[in-house]
Image (cartoon, rainbow, N blue to C red):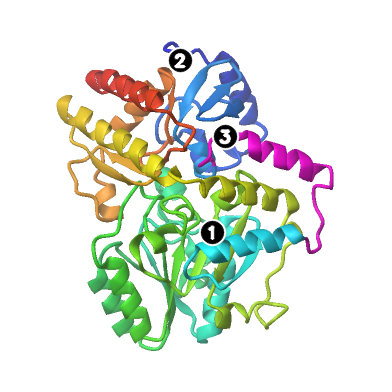
Amino acid sequence: MVNTTIKTTKSQEVFAAAQNLMPGGVSSPVRAFKSVGGQPIVFDRVKGAYIWDIDGNQYIDYVGTWGPAICGHAHPEVIAALHEALEKGTSFGAPSVLENVLAEMVIDAVPSIEMVRFVNSGTEACMGVLRLMRAFTKRDKIIKFEGCYHGHADTFLVKAGSGVATLGLPDSPGVPKAATSTTLTAPFNDLESVKALFEENRDEIAGVILEPVVGNAGFIAPDAGFLEGLRELTHEHGALLVFDEVMTGFRIAYGGAQEKFGVTPDLTTLGKVIGGGLPVGAYGGRRDIMSMVAPAGPVYQAGTLSGNPLAMTAGIKTLELLQKPGTYDYLERITKKLADGLLQIAKETGHAACGGQISAMFGLFFTSGPVHNYEDAKKSDTAKFGRFHRGMLERGIYLAPSQFEAGFTSFAHTEEDIEQTLAVARDVMSSL
């Protein structure tokens, strides 16, 4: 059972002190609760589907360290593997067999990947794949979609959703115009706008990059035929198709969105789940493209902590756990129960809402919808979401502190956790 009365005196004291030490008191903007009001709780420990703050309060967690904790926090088998790896050292800065093992697992699982390069974050993976797609095609322009977030590199901070949307910043100061002059944007789920961009920029577009299921403008699924249409368009125009599966990889299916929807891109970025909770990123794809990456080819990219043995160990064990029979069936069942339940409660309590889920990823918008893209998502009642978030938090349910973030479940969540969450949601929505 979780608490129903939450007192966060210690969290408030620590966060107040943090604001004098770090910009906004946090190391990543959305953690500051700017879009939902109130102050963030300060974590003390995590285990399974639960988190505890420094005041001793327990919460059911639907953030899962923003996606990696698909097995639940601090899974005993992952922790045991990490203890063993720690005895051998925390960083090598040199090749290890662990890289081979995880690389083989990723290549076997993800349809588009024939070779892979490990890095340290999703941002770094997207930076690497951007340079590579330009080098391979000898073109400079790229197409991204409004509300899709591909890390905080200059080129991608154009209508980038997520933390940028949460803070109400359309772009970021400090990004020179030259850095985004080759970035073209289109609405998600709008093939006609992509066709128009290709027509207007013939033989200039290196490729298209997107989250195949958007998680950084809230949860937005692709319309039927959208991903297939992008695959056809990029083929037709000699451009590359890149799926940013940092969020969806190994989460909505073992082989990611490309397995789920049967559309194979040329390149893929990964992160989160493949590090089992440790800092990690990766990009991979066709062998002829990846062979351009140094030292095999001329496209330079490097990193001291890339292929870190601890991240590789946690990733290997996490992927082993995900291969157990029935894992994704269970994730689909409990997440559907949660998502459908939230929508039903919203309807019964008189709130306009829409949303959905795919496997262990879900979302809820306070708007009648449907939500096909970022512009649709922005019609949501963010003030109401803020009240909903605060009400859930005060009753022991931890949701992403932004209307523009997807939620995540894990196979550590129980049916009872879902039922309790829905009971709390009914109470909160009845009082909004």
The residue labelled by disc 1 is 270
Of callouts 3 and 1, which one flags the residue occurring earlier in the amino acid sequence? 3
Distance between mark 3 and mark 2 Cα atoms: 17 Å
- Please provide percent x and percent y for residue 290: 59, 77
Q: Which mark is residue 73?
A: 3
The magenta stretch spans residue 215: no
Q: What span is colored magenta in the figure?
A: 69-96
Judging from the image, what secondary structure is the residue with disc 3 in?
loop
Residue type at mark 3: give it: His
The magenta stretch spans residue 71: yes
Residue type at mark 2: give it: Met
Query: Relative to 308, is 327 on the left or the right?
Result: left
Question: Observer-nearest residue: 373 or 375?
Answer: 373
The residue labelled by disc 2 is 1
Q: The C terminus appears in which quarter of the rendering?
A: top left
Distance between mark 1 and mark 2 Cα atoms: 35 Å
Q: Residue at x 59, y 60 (%)?
A: 105
Q: Nearer the viewer, mark 1 or mark 2?
A: 2
Q: Is residue 126 above or below residue 87?
A: below
Q: Is residue 166 above or below residue 414?
A: below
Q: Residues within 10 Å of mark 2 (few under 14, many from 20)?
A: few
Q: Residue at x 32, y 32 (%)?
A: 385
